[in-house]
Image (spheres, helix red, strand yellow):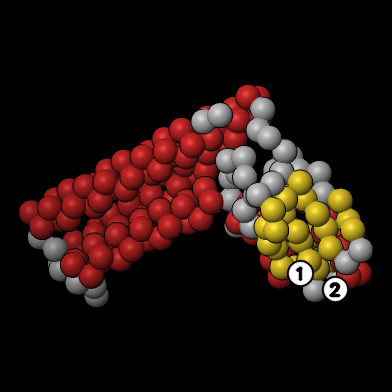
Amino acid sequence: MQDPTKALKEVENHMSSGIDHLIQDFSGVRTGKASPALIDNLDVYVQAYGGVQKLKSLAVINSPEPRMLNVQPFDPSTTRDIEKAIRESKLGLNPAAADRSIRVPIPELSEERRRDMVKLIKNLAEEAKIRLRSARKAGLDEAKKMKADNILTEDTLKNYEKDVQDLTNKHTKRIEELATAKENDLMKI
């Protein structure tokens, strides 16, 4: 049996973690300058060692210049696999292997590419809203269980449902604010 206050706090924690995930995703969407988060936060998967690995588990990523990323594989034998994974990712980058590292030039964003990035931002925001709705549904399902177990009365159930909806509205507004700010940042020339 769960306490309604704890259940509501759990719903809020799930929603907040969804917002944190969105912020992390947004940090990987480029705005015209090189950032290791561009590759690191968006999950780039590499076919290596007979399986699929996350890029960040195979290499160190840094930004030695404002428009250049440098990917340093831990194992030089994975250099070609990493280069291929970056090239085939949805980022639209053209990496070049050099000695024991991979140089990834970050081109200027064209108007068309900026619009593509805005679409990506909108998709990421929608995925975050889906996570919010999922957390809301889990919270409302928990409330129905508490009602069935006679932990909540009809009135407290209605108040709890209103509180969950208020949390959902608050977090939805935050997602929209984050998406708008990122879109504005992308569209600056």
What residue is at 21 percent from the left and 47 percent from the top? 166
Q: Which mark is residue 75?
A: 2
Residue 71 position in % (x across, y down): 76, 61
Is residue 153 placed above or below 124 in the rendered structure? Answer: below
What residue is at 25 percent from the left and 58 percent from the top? 144
In the image, taking residue 51 as reference, residue 180 lies left or right, namely left
Residue 2 position in % (x across, y down): 24, 72
What residue is at 30 percent from the left and 66 percent from the top? 10
Say which amino acid is labelled 1: Leu
Residue 84 position in % (x across, y down): 85, 52
Residue 161 position in % (x across, y down): 20, 51
Is residue 115 placed above or below 84 in the rendered structure? Answer: above
Q: Quadrant of the N terminus?
A: bottom left
106 or 175: nearer the viewer = 106
Say which amino acid is labelled 2: Asp
Q: Residue furthest top?
A: 111
What residue is at 63 percent from the left and 24 percent from the top? 111
Q: Which mark is residue 21?
A: none
Asked if residue 24 can be seen in this view, the reply is yes
Label 2 and label 1: CA atoms lie apart by 7 Å
In the image, taking residue 84 as reference, residue 131 lies left or right, namely left
What is the secondary structure assignment of the residue under circle 1?
loop
Is residue 8 placed above or below 116 in the rendered structure? Answer: below
Q: Which residue is mark 1?
A: 58
Q: Are marks 2 and 1 in contact (CB under 8 Å)?
A: yes
Number of numbered discs: 2
137 or 72: nearer the viewer = 72
- Label 2: how many Cα within 10 Å (few below 14, some 14–19, many 20+): few
In the image, taking residue 115 as reference, residue 179 lies left or right, namely left
Q: Residue furthest front?
A: 65
